Image: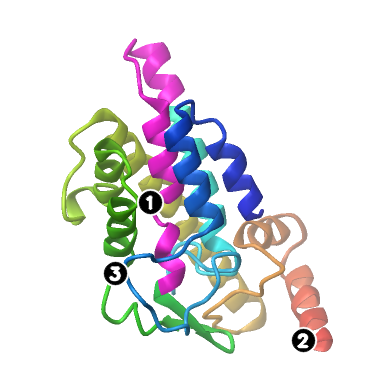
Amino acid sequence: MTIEELIKLAEKINDNNLREKVIDLIKNPKLTFLETPNDYISLEISPASKKRHHSYEKGLILHTLATTKIALALCDIIEEIYKVKVNRDIVIAASLLHDLFKFFTYSQNESKYKTSSIGERIDHLSLIVSEMYTRKFPLEVIHAVLAHHGKTGPMEPRTLEALIVHMADSVDAEINDEILFTAKNIVKECIGIDLEVLPKDISPFEIIKIKEEKGCEEIKRIFEVKKCTG
């Protein structure tokens, strides 16, 4: 999965001005209101967290794609079952941008993810909301991003669109958190190693399926190959 996949979803936004703003921010994810130290990781390879959900290479992009697709599925259900019209432009824009600036808050030391210099002082939500305000995004999109943490964030969702984004984010984060926890336990069970970060070329989903279908011996073989190849 790449940034191009995010742009393809952004192209579904009907409002021309909003679509251009979202695509430009994804293509040029820069802070225009603040100078930052350059010890952060790149968007292309950033995890979505240091130790919890999607805490592996490209996890941020995967989480953003999954959240947006879940949000759109929720739009389908709400419109079909509950007969309520949803503003999908707001949902798509906010889903794509809700965690976009997390990469600014992470750095990497060998195989460990750490907090960057700017992450020590400003959280990712403050960064993205400030940048959206600077770039004159619509209020409803800013609100949906600001409220995506739900009750644990600075503001709870006050619109249907914001609630959809919050629920989609929560669902994907929780699913991946459980999958990652299980995958790490499988590795520990099969080869006796506590991994802080999984190898970048195998996903936690793959580890679970391999264990299910071929057992610990295949897990051992895969990690032996990885050890030999560096």
**How far, Cα to Cα, is label 1 from label 2?**
36 Å
> Residue 101: horizontal and vertical position, in percent?
41, 63
Circle 2: element type: helix
Magenta stretch secondary structure, dominant:
helix
**How far, Cα to Cα, is label 3 from label 1?**
12 Å
Query: Nearer the N terminus, badge 3 or badge 1?
Result: 1
Q: Which residue is mark 2?
A: 227
> Residue 65: horizontal and vertical position, in percent?
54, 46
Residue plotted at (58% across, 78% down): 188
| Tag of residue 98 | 1
Return the residue nearer the eye: 46 or 200: 46
The span picked out in magenta is 75-104
> Residue 151: horizontal and vertical position, in percent?
18, 50
User: Is 218 inside the magenta-drawn segment?
Assistant: no
Return the residue nearer the eye: 188 or 173: 173
> Residue 33: horizontal and vertical position, in percent?
32, 66
Disc number lying in front (2 or 3): 3
Q: Which residue is mark 3?
A: 123
User: Is 166 drawn above or below residue 99 in the view shown?
Assistant: above
Three-letter code for the amino acid on which mark 1 is drawn = His
Circle 1: element type: loop
Return the residue nearer the eye: 213 or 2: 2
**How far, Cα to Cα, is label 2 from label 3?**
36 Å
Q: Are marks 3 and 1 in contact (CB under 8 Å)?
A: no
Counting other residues with Cα less than 10 Å from the Cα at mark 3, is it few (<14), some (14-19), or many (20 or more)? some
